[in-house]
Image (tube, rainbow, N blue to C red):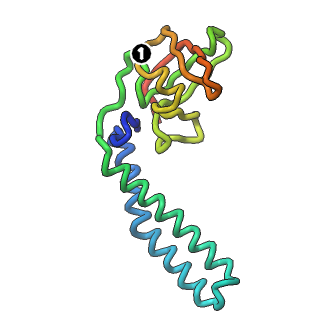
């Protein structure tokens, strides 16, 4: 999954299906489960001192936020193909860079939106300073991006290959 502008998110068919299934679960069975938890906690009595009730309401709020996020994401999603393995950095690719010309100081990350983030690999958004700096560069090219202190940092693209889940 990749985000290429503020409103359009490009998804592989697999990512789209996965997010749609999550939305269907959260909008259906998960809503029923949380409503049951809230009703059971409400029957316990005084709501001001009812930890189970407050925890269930908090869980419901988080769940509804996720439903809104997924709904918005899928409304603006475009399903497309994974990026080509042509050595050009693009969203949906695993990128390895070397910092400041030091080939031993490297970082490998997935260039994608946070919806595609996993515990297996660090993820950088294409809109992040590093992400926008490397996006469109070829293997062997140098890229610059702005650090939080306003200075520019340079990296060299060592590898760029499509992400395999």
**Residue at (53% x, 33% y) in the render:** 124
Decide if residue 24 is on the left or right side of residue 62.
left
Taking 20 as reference, is 86 above or below it?
above
Taking 4 as reference, is 29 above or below it?
below
What is the x, y in percent for residue 93?
Answer: 45, 27
Taking 8 as reference, is 99 above or below it?
above
Using a 10 Å C-alpha cutoff, classify the residue at mark 1 as few (fewer than 14 neighbours), some (14 to 19) or many (20 or more). many
**Residue at (38% x, 40% y) in the render:** 6
Decide if residue 39 is on the left or right side of residue 105.
left
Toward the front, the furthest residue is 150
Q: Quadrant of residue 98?
A: top right
Q: Quadrant of residue 153?
A: top right
**Residue at (67% x, 16% y) in the render:** 105
The residue where tag 1 is placed is: 87
What is the x, y in percent for residue 160?
Answer: 47, 19
Q: Secondary structure at mark 1?
A: loop
In this view, the residue in front, 45 or 104, is 45
Decide if residue 94 is on the left or right side of residue 153.
left
What is the x, y in percent for residue 126?
Answer: 46, 31
Q: Quadrant of residue 27?
A: bottom left
What is the x, y in percent for residue 80?
Answer: 29, 35
Quarter of the image with the N terminus is: top left
**Residue at (40% x, 59% y) in the render:** 23
Taking 103 as reference, is 57 above or below it?
below
């Amino acid at each position: 999954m990749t985000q290429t502008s503020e409103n359009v998110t490009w998804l592989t068919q697999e990512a789209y299906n996965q997010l749609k299934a999550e939305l269907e679960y959260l909008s259906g069975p998960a809503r029923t489960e949380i409503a049951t938890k809230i009703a059971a906690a409400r029957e316990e009595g005084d709501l001001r001192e009812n930890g189970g009730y407050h925890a269930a309401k908090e869980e419901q709020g988080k769940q509804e936020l996720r439903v809104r996020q997924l709904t918005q994401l899928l409304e603006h999603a475009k399903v497309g193909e994974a990026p080509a393995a042509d050595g050009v950095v693009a969203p949906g690719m695993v990128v390895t860079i070397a910092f400041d010309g030091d080939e031993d100081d490297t970082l490998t990350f997935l260039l994608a939106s946070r919806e595609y983030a996993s515990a297996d690999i660090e993820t950088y958004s294409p809109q992040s300073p590093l992400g926008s700096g490397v996006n469109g560069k070829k293997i062997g090219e140098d890229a610059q991006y702005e650090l939080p202190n306003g200075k520019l940092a340079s990296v060299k693209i060592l590898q760029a290959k499509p992400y395999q889940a």
